[in-house]
C-alpha cells in the first residue's frame, strides 16, 4: 500500500519536475498553473441548487434569473482567479550563504507584467504558514524565511504560490522550485585546534600561538590582505609608511586546518569541526590553509579566503550531499 | 489561511450587506423581528468597540429560542412562505455574532444571496429586480473584500465585483434565454398568507361587491388575431348551477371533454391570457374556447380549467369563437335536473310571477326572457354596489319586488331563478366583463372591479344563449365598464385626469413588457422564440444545439484567456534575441539560449567589423533600456527602434 503511494508520489514528482523545472526565473503560463474549484466553490454550487429548486418549484423566473446570474459569476470567477496568477514572473535573487541549522531569508521578486494589479496571493514553503501578498502593482519583493536541512548547494522544496481571489470559489496555484544559487555551509562545531606534534596531533586553543615560534625576518611593504596584527605600527608612527613584519615559517604546516588531523570523527563531524576552525581562525585574523582529501587551499587570510574554504567544505562530496 | 481573522473594515462591510438584504424584506416583517435583527447587528458592532462581550454558547441558544418563539407567536403553526422567510432571516441575522474568520463569512454570504432571491416570491416588479441586483452586488463586493486580506479596500472590492458582474452578463443572458424551464417537480406550494382577491367558488348576492372596489389586476389579454368589440368581452371563468336559496354554487361534477366545440368555418379569435396568480384552478376565456396545452382542460360547460392551482403568473393561448351561443343540442336527464333545480318553499312570489309570465310566453324561452326584461327595465330598477342588507330567506322576492336595487349578481341570480321556476334550464356564469385597452402595449387589462355575473339560457335543439340582465338596468356597465356605471360607489380611482391616465398606461406598458420578457419567459413562449431563431427542430436536435452553443460560449471565454496570456507573454528582449539569432543562422553561427543579447552582438561585430560602431551603439541602447526598467524587461519602444536600426545595418552589411 505504502509502496504504491510512494510510486505515485514519485511519478507525480517526476511529472512536476518535467513541467516545472528548477529555475531562477519563471513566468507563470497556462502550463504552469493548476486550477480547481475548492470547498467553498462546491458549497456555493450547493446553494445554487437550492435557489434553482426554489425557482422551479414556484415557477418563478426571476429567482431562476438570479441563479443564472450567480452561476455565470461563478464561471467568470474561474477566469478571474486564473488571471490573478497568470503571467506573473517570479525571480529568485542570489542568497547569502548560510550555516546549516540557521534560518535564511530567501529573496524573491515578483514582477507583474500585466496592467492590472494582482491581489491576495499567498506564498510560502509550508502550506500551514503562508505569507500573504496583498497587492502586486508592478513589482513586489519578499523574503521567505527558510531553514535548510542539507549542506551543499541550497536546495529549497517547491514553493507554493496560491490564490483564491476574487471570490474564493476557485483555488489557483503553482509549485515552483527556484534556484537561489545559494550555499549551505556545515554547522560549525566549536573544538580546539589540533596541530602536529611529533608523530601525533595535540589540541591547541589558538592558531596565533604557533606564530610565536616563527622567526622574525624583517620588514616589507604592506600589501593588501596582510593581517593588521603584523603591521609594524611603531615604524608607521615614525615614518607614516605601512610596513609588514615578515616571519619565517619555521614549522610550515603548523597553520594547516587539516582533515587528516581529525581521526576518529566521521565525515560530517570532520567538516563541522573544520568549519568551526575556519571561523575561529578568521576571527583571530590569522592566516590558515585548509587541507581536504580532494583539495588543498593555500595559506591566506581575509574574507574571500574564508568563503573559499567554507565553500570547499559545503561542496565536499559524500555524506548528506549524496 | 482560510482561517484568517478578518479585518474590522471587511466585517463591517459584510454586515452592511446583510443589513441591506434585511431592508429588502423589511416591509413584510413583524416589527419585533426587525428590532431583533438590528439588535444583533448593534451587539456585533459593540463587540468591535469592546463594550460588549461575545455571546457564549448559552446566550446564543437563548437568542435562537427567542427567535423561534417570536416567529411562532407571530405566524402561528401553519407554515407559510412568510413564516419560512422570517425564520431564515432570524437565523441569518444571528450569524454575524459569531463571524470572525474567513471561513465563517462564506455561509453568511451564501445565505444572503439566497435571501435576496426569495424577495421575488413576494414581488416581481422591475424595481424589486433592481433592488435585488444592487444588494447582490453589495454582497459580491463583500465577498471580494474578504480575499483582499490586510489590504481591505472598499473601493477596490466594489470595482472588482462590478466588473466581474458585468463580465458575467452575456453568459447569464444566454442561460436565461436558452435553458429550458422545468415544470414544478412536485407540488410543494406553500401559499402566501394574505391570500389574493378574486372570484370565489360560490356567489351570494353581495359577494361581488367587494371585488367591485378592488383595482387589482386580474389578468391581461394580448390579441393575436382578430377584433374584440366591447360587447363581446365576456370572460367566462366557471358556471354556477346549484342554488340553495342563498348561494349559487359551482357545477363541480362536470366532465372534462376532449376535442372542441368550435366548428371549422366559425369566425375565430386568438389571444394570449396573462393571468395573475389567483390560487385557484379556473382560467378565463371568451365564448367557446379551444386550447392545446397539456396542463389546461376544457370542461363540459365550455370553461377552462388548469390541472394545478395558479400560484404564479402564467400565460396561455386560446382560440375562441365569439357570439352569444354555446352549442349543446340536448341535455341529459341529470343535466336537466341540475339546471332546473331550485329550493322549494322560498321565494314563492317570484315563482308565481315566473309562472304567470311563462303562460304569456307560450313556452318560448327567449320570449320569456324578453318579458322579464320588460318587467325589470320598466320598474325603475337601480344598479348600485350598495343595495342595503337583507337577511330574510326570500332574497329574490325582496330584490324583485321591494328593494329593486343591486348589482350584477342580484340580477343574474334572479333571472336564472325565474327561468328555472318557469321550467327553462339556466345557469349563472361567473367571470369578468370588459377590459381596459392600453394602446402603448396593445393589451387589454382586466381588473378585479370588472368581476361580473350573467346568465346562460338553454334553448332546446340549439344550446346555451348568453343573457346579461345587468345591461337592462345599466347599459353603461356593459358599454363602458363599471367606472362609468357607478361613479359614486366606486372607489378604485379618485383622480381621473388625462395625464394621470396616460402615466398609468405608460407604467402598465413597462410592466407589461417586464412581465412578458422576464417573468413569463418560459415554456411555450421560450420554445416559440427559440424556434424562431434556430428553426423547428426535434427535441434531441434542440438540446444538442443548445449544448453545443453553451460549450462554444465557454470555449470563447477560455480562448479569451488564452489570447490574453499570449499578449502578456510577449517579452521583447526574447523577440530581439530571436531576430539576432535568425541573422546569425545565415552565417552558420549557432546561438544557445544562454547567450545574452550583448554576447550575440559581440559575435556580430566579429562577423561585420565594418559595422562595429553602429553595433556597439545598438548594444548600449539595449543595455540602457534593460537597466532603466525596474524589472529587466525591454520596452516595446526600444525594441522597435532597435529592430529598425538592425535592419539598416543588415542592408549596409549586405552591400
Image (tube, coloured by chain):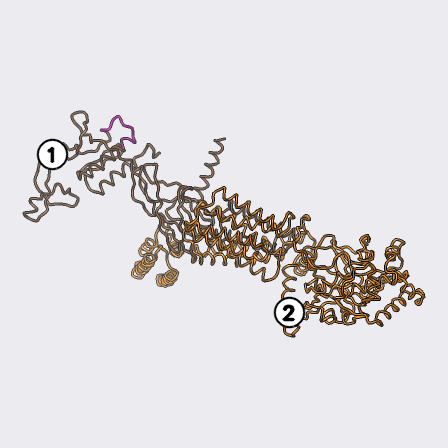
Chain colours: A brown, B orange
Label 1 environment density (alpha carbons within 10 Å; few <14, some 14–19, many ≥20): few
Residue sitting at 82 percent across and 52 percent down?
B253
Chain to which mark 2 belongs: B
Kindly indicate whether the residues beneath marks 1 and 2 are on one polypeptide chain.
no
Which of the two discs, 1 and 2, sits closer to the camera?
2
A280 falls in the magenta region: no
Q: Horizontal and vertical percent for residue A73?
A: 53, 54
Q: CB of mark 1 within 8 Å of CB of mark 2?
A: no
Q: Horizontal and vertical percent for residue B577?
A: 38, 55
Residue with the most extreme left position = A238
Q: Is residue B279 left or right of residue B547?
A: right
Q: Nearer the viewer, residue B563 or B68?
A: B68
Q: Nearer the viewer, residue B42 or B352?
A: B352
Asked which secondary structure carries label 1, the reply is: loop
Q: Horizontal and vertical percent for residue A220?
A: 9, 43
Q: Nearer the viewer, residue B650 or B246?
A: B246
Asked which secondary structure carries label 2, the reply is: helix
Q: Is residue B239 left or right of residue A317?
A: right
**Gap between marks 1 and 2, in whole Å?**
114 Å
**In the rendered image, which quarter contains the C terminus of chain A?**
top left
In this figure, which residue is indicated by the disc labeled 2?
A: B504
Could you say which quadrant of the image residue B394 lies in? bottom right
Chain to which mark 1 belongs: A
Q: In the image, is residue B146 above or below residue B400?
A: above
Residue sitting at 26 percent across and 26 percent down?
A264
Q: Horizontal and vertical percent for residue B345?
A: 88, 57
In this figure, which residue is indicated by the disc labeled 1?
A: A212
Residue B578 in view of the camera: no
| Magenta-tinted stretch | A260-270
Label 2 environment density (alpha carbons within 10 Å; few <14, some 14–19, many ≥20): few
Residue B349 in view of the camera: yes
Amino acid at each position: 500500500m505504502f509502496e504504491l503511494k510512494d510510486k505515485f508520489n514519485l511519478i507525480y514528482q517526476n511529472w512536476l519536475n518535467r513541467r516545472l523545472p528548477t529555475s531562477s526565473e519563471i513566468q507563470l503560463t497556462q502550463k504552469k498553473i493548476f486550477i480547481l474549484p475548492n470547498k467553498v466553490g462546491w458549497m456555493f454550487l450547493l446553494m445554487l441548487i437550492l435557489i434553482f429548486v426554489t425557482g422551479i418549484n414556484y415557477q418563478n423566473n426571476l429567482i431562476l434569473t438570479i441563479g443564472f446570474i450567480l452561476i455565470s459569476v461563478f464561471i467568470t470567477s474561474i477566469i478571474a482567479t486564473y488571471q490573478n496568477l497568470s503571467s506573473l514572473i517570479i525571480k529568485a535573487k542570489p542568497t547569502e550563504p548560510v550555516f546549516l541549522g540557521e534560518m535564511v531569508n530567501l529573496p524573491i521578486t515578483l514582477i507583474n507584467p500585466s496592467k492590472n494589479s494582482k491581489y491576495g496571493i499567498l506564498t510560502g514553503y509550508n502550506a500551514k504558514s503562508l505569507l500573504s501578498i496583498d497587492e502586486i502593482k508592478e513589482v513586489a519583493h519578499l523574503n521567505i524565511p527558510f531553514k535548510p536541512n542539507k549542506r551543499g548547494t541550497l536546495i529549497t522544496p517547491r514553493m507554493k504560490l496560491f490564490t483564491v481571489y476574487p471570490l474564493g470559489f476557485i483555488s489557483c496555484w503553482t509549485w515552483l522550485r527556484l534556484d537561489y544559487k545559494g550555499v549551505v555551509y556545515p554547522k560549525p562545531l566549536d573544538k580546539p585546534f589540533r596541530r602536529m606534534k611529533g608523530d601525533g596531533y595535540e589540541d591547541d586553543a589558538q592558531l596565533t600561538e604557533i606564530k610565536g615560534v616563527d622567526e622574525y625576518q624583517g620588514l616589507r611593504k604592506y600589501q593588501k590582505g596582510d593581517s593588521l596584527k603584523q603591521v609594524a605600527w611603531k615604524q608607521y608612527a615614525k615614518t607614516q609608511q605601512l610596513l609588514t613584519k615578515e616571519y619565517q615559517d619555521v614549522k610550515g604546516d603548523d597553520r594547516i586546518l587539516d582533515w587528516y588531523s581529525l581521526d576518529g570523527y566521521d565525515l560530517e563531524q570532520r567538516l563541522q569541526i573544520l568549519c568551526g576552525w575556519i571561523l575561529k581562525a578568521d576571527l583571530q585574523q590569522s592566516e590558515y590553509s585548509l587541507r581536504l582529501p580532494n583539495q588543498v587551499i593555500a595559506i591566506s587570510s581575509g574574507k574571500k579566503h574564508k568563503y573559499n574554504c567554507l565553500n570547499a567544505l559545503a561542496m565536499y562530496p559524500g555524506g548528506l550531499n549524496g | 489561511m482560510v482561517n484568517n481573522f478578518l479585518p474590522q473594515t471587511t466585517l463591517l462591510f459584510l454586515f452592511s450587506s446583510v443589513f441591506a438584504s434585511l431592508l429588502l424584506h423589511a416591509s413584510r416583517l413583524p416589527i419585533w423581528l426587525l428590532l431583533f435583527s438590528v439588535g444583533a447587528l448593534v451587539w456585533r458592532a459593540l463587540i468591535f468597540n469592546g463594550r460588549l462581550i461575545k455571546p457564549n454558547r448559552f446566550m446564543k441558544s437563548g437568542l435562537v429560542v427567542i427567535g423561534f418563539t417570536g416567529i411562532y407567536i407571530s405566524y402561528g403553526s401553519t407554515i407559510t412562505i412568510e413564516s419560512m422567510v422570517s425564520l431564515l432571516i432570524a437565523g441569518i441575522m444571528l450569524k454575524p455574532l459569531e463571524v470572525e474568520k474567513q471561513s465563517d463569512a462564506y455561509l453568511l454570504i451564501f445565505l444572503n444571496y439566497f435571501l435576496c432571491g426569495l424577495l421575488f416570491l413576494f414581488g416581481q416588479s422591475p424595481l424589486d429586480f433592481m433592488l435585488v441586483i444592487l444588494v447582490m452586488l453589495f454582497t459580491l463586493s463583500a465577498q471580494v473584500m474578504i480575499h483582499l486580506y490586510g489590504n481591505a479596500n472598499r473601493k477596490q472590492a466594489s470595482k472588482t465585483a462590478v466588473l466581474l458582474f458585468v463580465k458575467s452578463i452575456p453568459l447569464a443572458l444566454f442561460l436565461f434565454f436558452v435553458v429550458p424551464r422545468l415544470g414544478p417537480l412536485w407540488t410543494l406550494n406553500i401559499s402566501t398568507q394574505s391570500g389574493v382577491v378574486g372570484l370565489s367558488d360560490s356567489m351570494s348576492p353581495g359577494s361581488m361587491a367587494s371585488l367591485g372596489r378592488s383595482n387589482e389586476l386580474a389578468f391581461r389579454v394580448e390579441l393575436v388575431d382578430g377584433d374584440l368589440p366591447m360587447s363581446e368581452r365576456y370572460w367566462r371563468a366557471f358556471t354556477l348551477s346549484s342554488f340553495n336559496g342563498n348561494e349559487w354554487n359551482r357545477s363541480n361534477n362536470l366532465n372534462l371533454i376532449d376535442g372542441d366545440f368550435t366548428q371549422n368555418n366559425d369566425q375565430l379569435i386568438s389571444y394570449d391570457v396573462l393571468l395573475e396568480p389567483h390560487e385557484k384552478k379556473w382560467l378565463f376565456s371568451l365564448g367557446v374556447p379551444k386550447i392545446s396545452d397539456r396542463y389546461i382542460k376544457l370542461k363540459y360547460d365550455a370553461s377552462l380549467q388548469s390541472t394545478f392551482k395558479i400560484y404564479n403568473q402564467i400565460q396561455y393561448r386560446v382560440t375562441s369563437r365569439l357570439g352569444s351561443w354555446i352549442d349543446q343540442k340536448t341535455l341529459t336527464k341529470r343535466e336537466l335536473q341540475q339546471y332546473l333545480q331550485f329550493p322549494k318553499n322560498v321565494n314563492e312570489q317570484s315563482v308565481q310571477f315566473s309562472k304567470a309570465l311563462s303562460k304569456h310566453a307560450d313556452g318560448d324561452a327567449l320570449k320569456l326572457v324578453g318579458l322579464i326584461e320588460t318587467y325589470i327595465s320598466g320598474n325603475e330598477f337601480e344598479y348600485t354596489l350598495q343595495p342595503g342588507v337583507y337577511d330574510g330567506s326570500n332574497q329574490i322576492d325582496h330584490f324583485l319586488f321591494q328593494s329593486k336595487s343591486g348589482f350584477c349578481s342580484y340580477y343574474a341570480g334572479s333571472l336564472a331563478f325565474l327561468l328555472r321556476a318557469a321550467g327553462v334550464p339556466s345557469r349563472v356564469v361567473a367571470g369578468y366583463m370588459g377590459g381596459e385597452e392600453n394602446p402603448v402595449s396593445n393589451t387589454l387589462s382586466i381588473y378585479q372591479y370588472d368581476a361580473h355575473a350573467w346568465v346562460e339560457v338553454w334553448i332546446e335543439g340549439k344550446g346555451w344563449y348568453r343573457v346579461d340582465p345587468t345591461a337592462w338596468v345599466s347599459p353603461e356597465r356593459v358599454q363602458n365598464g363599471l367606472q362609468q356605471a357607478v361613479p359614486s360607489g366606486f372607489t378604485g380611482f379618485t383622480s381621473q385626469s388625462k395625464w394621470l391616465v396616460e402615466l398609468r398606461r405608460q407604467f402598465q406598458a413597462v410592466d407589461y413588457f417586464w412581465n412578458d420578457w422576464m417573468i413569463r419567459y418560459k415554456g411555450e413562449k421560450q420554445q416559440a422564440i427559440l424556434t424562431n431563431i434556430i428553426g423547428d427542430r426535434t427535441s434531441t436536435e434542440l438540446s444538442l444545439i443548445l449544448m453545443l452553443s453553451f460549450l462554444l460560449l465557454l470555449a470563447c471565454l477560455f480562448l479569451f484567456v488564452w489570447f490574453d496570456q499570449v499578449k502578456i507573454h510577449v517579452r521583447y528582449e526574447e523577440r530581439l534575441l530571436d531576430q539576432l539569432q535568425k541573422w546569425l543562422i545565415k552565417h552558420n553561427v549557432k546561438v544557445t539560449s544562454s547567450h545574452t543579447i550583448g554576447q550575440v552582438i559581440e559575435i556580430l561585430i566579429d562577423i561585420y567589423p565594418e559595422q562595429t560602431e553602429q553595433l556597439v551603439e545598438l548594444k548600449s541602447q539595449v543595455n540602457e533600456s534593460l537597466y532603466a526598467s525596474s524589472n529587466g524587461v525591454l520596452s516595446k519602444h526600444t525594441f522597435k527602434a532597435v529592430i529598425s536600426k538592425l535592419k539598416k545595418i543588415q542592408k549596409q552589411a549586405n552591400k
